[in-house]
Amino acid sequence: MAAPEGNPFRNTDAHGRLDRLVEEIMNSKLVVAFPSESLAGAAAKMDQRDVGRLPVVTHSDPRRLAGMIARSDILRAYHRALAGLQAPRGMPRSDSRARMEERMQSGDGIP
């Protein structure tokens, strides 16, 4: 089945509502994370504000976007830490996966 082309809301009651500007519905009370912040701190902010992502800004220039962190990024990091699969800085994920497979084959891995 081919994906529909164009505006999927074209023939619906929602079409007129999509003509509004982003500034009309955006939340201007930003919650941000900092690169030096703990994952637990960022997760707590997401939970308190019921958001799934946070913009990451630096302390030196909080108006400049340094990146984004998502709830799924935090869950992935916690999973890897719990599983003992944290790859050292600079080691590609594929190397980490190879280490995990070796540990599992040797009997030292996760059951």
Image (cartoon, helix red, strand yellow):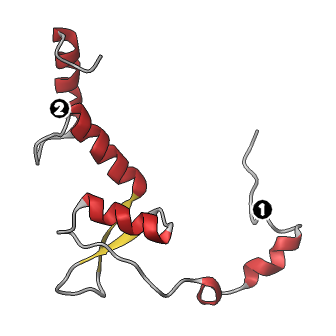
Q: Residue at x 76, y 53 (%)?
A: 4
What amino acid does circle 2 point to?
Asp
Q: Residue at x 41, y 51 (%)?
A: 72
- Residue 95 vertical position relative to residue 55 in the rendered view, above or below: above
Q: Earlier in the sequence, mark 1 or mark 2?
A: 1
Residue 38, disc: none
The nearer-to-camera label among 1 and 2 is: 2
* Residue 73 image point, x, y percent: 35, 52
Residue under label 1: 8
Q: Residue at x 16, y 10 (%)?
A: 106
Q: Residue at x 77, y 62 (%)?
A: 8
Mark 2 secondary-structure assignment: helix
Residue under label 2: 95
Label 1 crowd bin: few (<14), some (14–19), many (20+), radius 10 Å: few
Which quadrant, please, contains the N terminus? top right
In terms of depth relative to the viewer, which is nearer, 14 or 4? 14
Label 2 crowd bin: few (<14), some (14–19), many (20+), radius 10 Å: few
What amino acid does circle 1 point to?
Pro
